[in-house]
Amino acid sequence: MGTLKALELVGGLSALRRVTSALAEARIRDVVVVTGYHAERLRPELRRLGLRAAHNPDPGRGMFSSVQTGVRALEARHDAFFVLAVDYALTRPTVLTALTACLQAEDVDVVHPRCGGLRGHPPLLSSLLRPVVLSAPGDTRLDALLEQHAPRQLDVDTDDLTVLLDMDTPRDLEASRRLAWFLEPPSDDSPTPLPVAPAEQDALYILERLQTPQRVVAHCRAVAEVGVNLAAALKPHLPGLDVDLVAAACLLHDMVRLEGARRHAPLAESILRNLGLTRLAEVVGAHMTLPHDPSLSPMPNEEELVYLADKLVVEDRLAGLDERERRAIALYGKDEATISRIGSRIGTARAIAAKVEVVTGTPLHEIIGLD
């Protein structure tokens, strides 16, 4: 990072204050802050927050030596302990309480939060592992130690992107600062209204943190180009239409379409809701199955445009609805029920396309640039 992460401001608060406040809200009372380099610079913030510190005199030995310093300073009476790095500044108390409840209910040694099929931070360790941690060599990696000495590990789906959001670079820090706006929106009387969707750079950052495969990212980019063209053509006729919302929803609609994840549309919706992006979550969650009949309204909305844009793209190239239907049937049409569902979805897309043409007075192929 090149700076002292613990004192960097995220959402108006130091990273240290954010992390320790999340612990306090989760009713974690015994908190030890491990200091190493620049301990003197941290001391005023520690005093201001009333936090207890344990100093690692030789942090150059590696991160595990700081884990050992913290575990050694904890009170021995605890049943379990978190290992929480300060650069996970957006950690939410709901994640911590979910992990605590899981460890209390399950016969396991370690509980990890997971988002979109990916293991995140922080882990919650049973106190039975305390002597194992303290007796290990200082150059040990915590994950390697747990794999060797904690056979009973459990991953808990939290649908919370913050478990994947650490701050290793200035780019990470800036992204965390922007995402903090949505997690803690300004008050109703704030002079700057909060957008309902992140900008393109942050949508792409979310895809990166979720390790969305590049072929899927390419598809999302192509869908976003189509969606923006549709929304831009409609905007003069529908001033209330949010073009930026359409763009972000198209970029993120397949954000968890990867191996090991649950059904991707509702999972993406849940993750976005937990980021405070409620309206975006609604639009993304509807890209497979619309919650309404588009024929009931003459005007297309954001959900319908994302739904249509997705159906107009095959892999990462623009296609027509006829081609999309033929391809879907060739790949998945193993029985009449599946073929019927495919036909129904394409029929819905055709109904939306017809509305777009009526409102704009322009053929769909001209709007999207399809020969």
Image: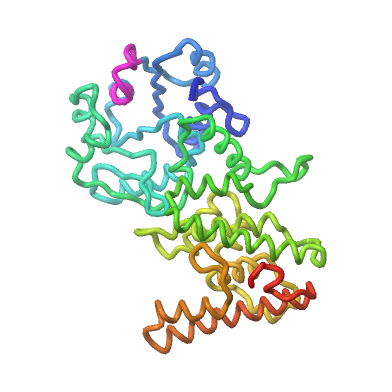
Q: Residue at x 23, y 30 (%)?
A: 130
- Between residue 192 and residue 13, name the one nearer to us: 192
The x and y percentages for residue 156 are: 35, 51
Vertical position of residue 279 compared to residue 96: above or below: below
Is 305 left, or right, of 103 in this rendering? right
Would you identify the image quadrant in which residue 243 lies?
bottom right
- At x 30% / y 32%, what residue is drawn? 78
How many marks overall?
Answer: 0
| Spot occupied by residue 353 in the image (x, y as percentages of width and height) | 67, 76
Residue 351 or residue 36, whichever sits in front: 351
List x then y, in percent, for residue 163: 44, 43
Residue 200, placed above or below residue 353: above
Examine the structure image and report whether residue 189 is included in the region drawn in magenta: no
Q: Is residue 264 left or right of residue 275?
A: left
- What residue is drawn where x is 62% and y is 59%? 225
Residue at image coords 68%, 54%: 244
Residue lying at the far bottom of the rendered structure: 336
- Residue 331 at x, y percent in the picture: 40, 77
Image position of 360 with respect to 90: above or below: below
Determine the image quadrant of residue 246.
bottom right
Its colouring scheme is rainbow
Instruction: Name the quadrant containing residue 245.
Output: bottom right
For the C terminus, which image quadrant? bottom right
Q: Quick one: which residue is furthest to the front in this view?
A: 371
Q: Which residues are magenta?
A: 56-68
Task: Please name the predominant secondary structure of the magenta segment in the image.
Answer: helix
Near-viewer residue (4 or 326): 326
